[in-house]
Amino acid sequence: MIIRLLAGRPILLAVGLLAALTLPWVIYPPVAMDMICWALFAVAVDLLLGFTGLLSFGHAAFWGTAAYVSGLIAVHSGLPFPVAVLAGALAAATLAVPIGWLSVRSTGIYFAMVTLAFAQLVYFVANQWRGLTGGENGLQGIPRDLFGVDLSDPFFFYYAGLPIILAGLWCAWRVVRSPFGRVLVAVRDNPARARALGYPVEKYKLLAFVLSAALSGLAGGLFAIGHGFVSLQEVYWTTSGQAVMMVVLGGIGTLWGGVIGAGLIVELNDYLATAGFEEIGIVTGTVFAATVLIFRRGIWGTARHLLTGHSGRRGRAGAGRSAAADGEAVRA
Amino acid sequence: MATVLSAQGLSKEFRGFRAVDDVDLDVTEGSVHALVGPNGAGKTTLFNLLTGFLAPTAGRITLARQELAGRPPDQIARLGVARSFQISSLFPQLTARDHVELALQGGTGLGWRFWRSDRRMARFRNRALELLDEVRLANLAETHAGALSYGHKRALELALALALDPKVLLLDEPTAGMGVEDVTATVELIGRVRAGRTVVLVEHNMKVVATLADTVTVMQSGRVLVEGPYADIRRDPRVVTAYLGDADASD
Ligand SMILES: Nc1ncnc2c1ncn2[C@@H]1O[C@H](COP(=O)(O)OP(=O)(O)OP(=O)(O)O)[C@@H](O)[C@H]1O
Ligand SMILES: [Mg+2]
């Protein structure tokens, strides 16, 4: 009973908020900043993967584009950093319209491949357009301006950036718990049926794609300002892959899972890097593989399943058929 | 009597194989129109063409003078052609009421409001419960579709089609695989909901056809073999050879 209560939404929210507020006291503030940016990025990817059933392997395009756009605006205009970040998110959403329009017609592995192809195109452009992006040298010297407040200390910048991330997470939650979110889950579980009920499936997927890209952009833009620097890494395919990995690790279709996955991967990466470990990919890859093999629903998905004895309200806790089958088995 | 849904010269080819071959069909407003024929005759394919799930290779489809061919399924559904699927097609994790609310929302713009709370869907609750009552599922409103019995799933399919408030209701084998009791209940149900509606029914059970249908179209190998009232059709020698032989002998 107490465990059930602990898993209840208000308590979870309070715990999460407390963790977010105390994070830079516990860990190195720049790492804390990375963590919350990646958390929003992973949640944005989960919006598509978990709630629309679309595995995008090209979200680095949106995270990275927003990073460049926010960085460039901050460098050249001197506008307050939240404006630059919002402009980055807007740029990502705009880019997502044509990419989404061309991708949502395909499903499954083809969708992953098409999005990956577009992301590689964005990478190519970023690499070639040296005058703007700095190419392999990266975009350097991004200021963090907020009406003249000194934010050079990462500890204070964390608190300046946190509201943006929290707002982004709230948006993701709002979308999932909206009439639109209900349609998305229907589209995910049975697109033909959703069509027969009068829902234009592709258009719904496209809007979900654009919203997901906008939130990814919000995260990527803040990430760029936080680092004061954008490298080609932000549009590289491994960045897309890492976001997907975080979602799968934490639990697909759970929102919280993305946050937990991001926390773990960023912490692990930082720990290994500080320890001077070279092959970080091997360790994170192994941890990832082991976790997914042991906890099929991911960390948060499994925890919630054990705590509450079911896979989520209205069965929104899973992607696609297998989750649907689980839901049935549990209830029978 | 006015024709509400009609097809002219409708064909569908799958890699050279004509599953539907030059079909003309006129569905009269307010009638129950049965579509019968042996397995593989092209009945489901015809439904898929009429509802936009497949694009015709040739031909025209009109709903009350509006051209339907080339439109996507969701638009056709909103224009007033609702369908049920031969194999129940539901959302296992949603309750019966969730299903009907989703169907009622389909025709409104609410589904786009990603900034609203899903509590707004409560506005469909009363109507959803009415529809569930109409198909005798009121006491199962909060049951998940995955846990419904076969007959109840078919009834829910019917409620979803009704929720769209369609001009024409296309039902693909609503009694398939049912026991005698469920068949009787379903026939009674369709007999009740047909009032003021137009129904096209694919059906193998000739007793069901005899009870419900005003007009019967017999298909074979993608073509229309004959069309007319059941009483005429059952005596037609071509139909007897093609299809009705067994059923006729048995009653
Ligand atoms: N997508 C498809 N691709 C290729 N062939 C198809 C396709 N859909 C149907 N067919 C073929 O078209 C023919 C007609 O199929 P259809 O499902 O329309 O028959 P039916 O009259 O509904 O039969 P049943 O009574 O068994 O439901 C069959 O030979 C079938 O194999
Ligand atoms: Mg069929």
Image (spheres, coloured by chain):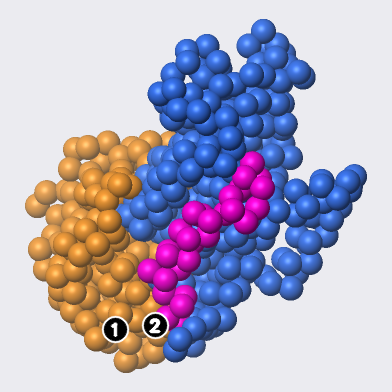
| Residue depicted at x 25% and y 76% | B210
What is the count of numbered marks? 2
Q: Which chain is orange?
A: B
Q: Which chain is blue?
A: A
**Residue B148 is one of the magenta-drawn residues:** no
Name the disc covering residue B140, or none: 1
What x and y, as percent, mark residue A207? 41, 40
Q: Can residue A10 be seen at all in this image of the molecule?
A: yes
Chain of the residue on which disc 1 is drawn? B
- Tell which of A330 and A250 is nearer to you: A250
What x and y, as percent, mark residue B30? 13, 60
Cα separation between marks 1 and 2: 8 Å
- The answer to whether the residues at label 1 and label 2 have Cβ atoms under 8 Å apart is yes
Q: Is residue A4 left or right of residue B230?
A: right
Give the residue number, with chain letter if any, for mark 2: B148
**Residue A12 is one of the magenta-drawn residues:** yes
